[in-house]
Image (tube, rainbow, N blue to C red):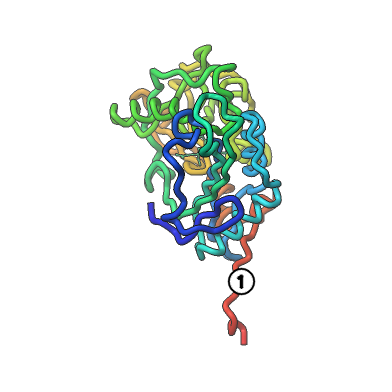
Amino acid sequence: MTPTEKIWHNGRFVNWDDAKIHVLSHVVSYGTSVFEGIRCYATPAGPAVFRLPEHVRRMIDSGRIYRMDMGYTREQLMEAMLELVRVNKLRSCYLRPIALRGYGEIGVNPLKNPVDVYIACWEWGKYLGEEALANGVDVCVSSWTRIAPNTLPALAKAGANYMNSQLIKMEALLNGFSEGIALDASGYVSEGSGENIFVVRDGKIHTPPLGASVLPGITRDTVLKLAAERGIPIVETLIPREMLYVADEVFFSGTAAEITPIRSVDRIQVGEGRRGPIAEALQADFFGIIEGTKPDRHGWLTQVHVPQPSGVGD
Ligand code: PPE
């Protein structure tokens, strides 16, 4: 990770190296945090953040589920992120807002500990490797089950959920795969350690419903809308594991992973063993919008509005 100059903390900009917490902060022992991952892209009109209002809304929702009042409105958090990108003078970056229970009391009860909000950003390349977007990745079905309903809420993007994700990811990597797909507590396909999943058969796209312990992905929603626009049938439905083995295409979506094709599952080739036509078409729409070569019909980009240096245009 390449440090940037500033991190936003409770309404103030602090130096990157000064954004520190005490070891007895509630979050360290008990995992008390909610966060987001957001990408800012370099468009021809300048840096623009992809689906910023939706990400901030999900962060506030995550906090609500865990009774964490952030003390900032959606508008304030959005403005803080835009200002942070300007302050750090970045053309493109990944933004990571985090709300955590800080230092005060020790013990499980979080309610006496302050809620601290931080926002960091840095330049972050391709999540599953440069080649993954074009050629696809090799994945496995995890031996770990995704967090079950009524244990940890999957709709919240909470730090603690990622202990489950880490088990999925480590197992996959140590066995020579790029990523693992977790099944839900009933044995249906859920999601990757950090991505939603889509399965194509006979021209129709399937994706697990929110009840299958998935994060309500913003990119997932983007894929649902882009597919509908192209007239590609897309349904949210329970997916049996073996659908992965007989699919024509399988692909991931996520802020970090964007739209990444999957070319094999458990060493069984998916379709032709390379990126399929539906994934390619959706990538073309997605990258077209974020690169500014296709119109932003849905208003998904929020311009950062970098001030022009004085003298330009004189
Ligand atoms: N499921 C999980 C478990 C998940 O972590 C993500 C995002 C998604 C689905 C896709 O959601 P969305 O980004 O809104 O489309 N994972 C973030 C964190 C990755 C990380 O390694 O950290 C991300 O993609 O930014």
* 307 versus 222 height, above or below: below
Q: In the picture shown, does residue 176 fall above or below 45?
A: above
Q: Residue at x 51, y 38 (%)?
A: 103
Helix, strand or loop at mark 1: loop
Query: Which part of the image, by quadrant, shows the C terminus?
Result: bottom right
State the image quarter where residue 178 is shown.
Answer: top left
The answer to whether 108 is drawn above or below residue 72 in the figure is above
Residue annotated with mark 1: 307
Residue drawn where x is 60% and y is 32% of the image: 112
- Left or right: 101 with respect to 228? left
Residue 241 at x, y = what percent? 47, 17
Where residue 224 appears, as percent x and y from the top left, is: 63, 35
Q: Evaluate whether residue 249 shows in this view.
A: no
Residue 305, image x, y percentages: 63, 65
- Of residues 259 and 122, the one drawn nearer to the viewer in this rendering: 122
User: Which residue occupies the foreground of this view, 285 or 37?
Assistant: 37
Count of numbered marks: 1
